[in-house]
Amino acid sequence: MSRSPLPPGQRELARLPVRTVGEPPPFDGSYWSLTLSGELDRPRVFTLAELRAMATFDLEADFHAAAGWSVRALHWRGARLCDVLAAAGLRSTARWVRAYDGQRYDSSLAIADALEPDVLLATGLAGAELPLEHGGPLRLLVPARYGWKSVKWLRTLEVYAEERPGFWERRGFHPRGDPWKEERLS
């Protein structure tokens, strides 16, 4: 079986390492929620049980870090972000999605990138619930972008008319982060 090439400048790792900005937040599933707001006709708040019930999409995808490593063929489970945003009624003014962990980390995605069919609100990894160290209970997964776009411990998705740069974008990283184009820095 032939494997597809890695993006330029990447080396393969056997396992997904644990890399974070800050510490994992305390987690209690009885009060945890995801808020969806902004340029939407039907903003709402999801419970963890609702998101786990919606998490019916399985995806095998590589994960690429701007630090130069990639992990191949990870098995994710989640709800497709395009379906969640469609159900919320994207307004014609919607151009950007900001994903925020509720603490200090956020990232922004152009709406076209957010609506790609492989972008997930991931609740599972490798056939189990998404572990805390990899962003559980909910992580935004954006396989076609560098890992800094895949926000761990996701608590808020805000849809905006104008870009609001995220944690790494404010520090000079590229707004799109395409590993095939080596879009690490602006």
Image: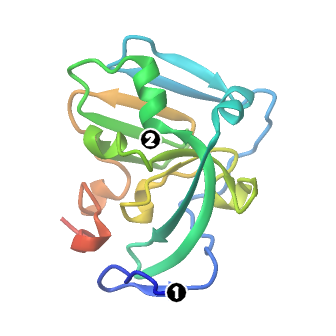
Under mark 1, the amino acid is Met
In this rendering, is residue 99 above or below 74?
above
Q: Which residue is mark 1?
A: 1
Across and down, in percent, residue 155 comes to 57, 36
User: Which of the numbered marks, if any, corresponds to residue 158?
Assistant: none
Q: Using the numbered discs, state the Cα–Cα distance from disc 2 to disc 1 in whole angstroms.
A: 37 Å
Across and down, in percent, residue 98 comes to 38, 38
Locate residue 108: give its quadrant. Answer: top left
In this rendering, is residue 85 above or below 181?
above
Q: Nearer the viewer, residue 127 or 156?
A: 127
Q: Which residue is mark 2?
A: 99
* Residue at the image position 71 percent from the left and 31 percent from the top: 53
In this rendering, is residue 109 above or below 179?
above
Q: Nearer the viewer, residue 116 or 8?
A: 116
- State the SS at label 1: loop
In this rendering, is residue 168 above or below 49?
below
Under mark 2, the amino acid is Ala
Packing grade of label 2 (10 A; few <14, some 14-19, many >=20) is many
Callout 2 touching callout 1 (CB < 8 Å):
no
Which quarter of the image is occupied by the C terminus? bottom left
Across and down, in percent, residue 46 comes to 62, 24
* Residue at the image position 70 percent from the left and 45 percent from the top: 137
Q: How is the image coloured?
A: rainbow
Across and down, in percent, residue 182 comes to 25, 74
* Residue at the image position 49 percent from the left and 68 percent from the top: 63
- State the SS at label 2: strand
Locate residue 49: give its quadrant. Answer: top right
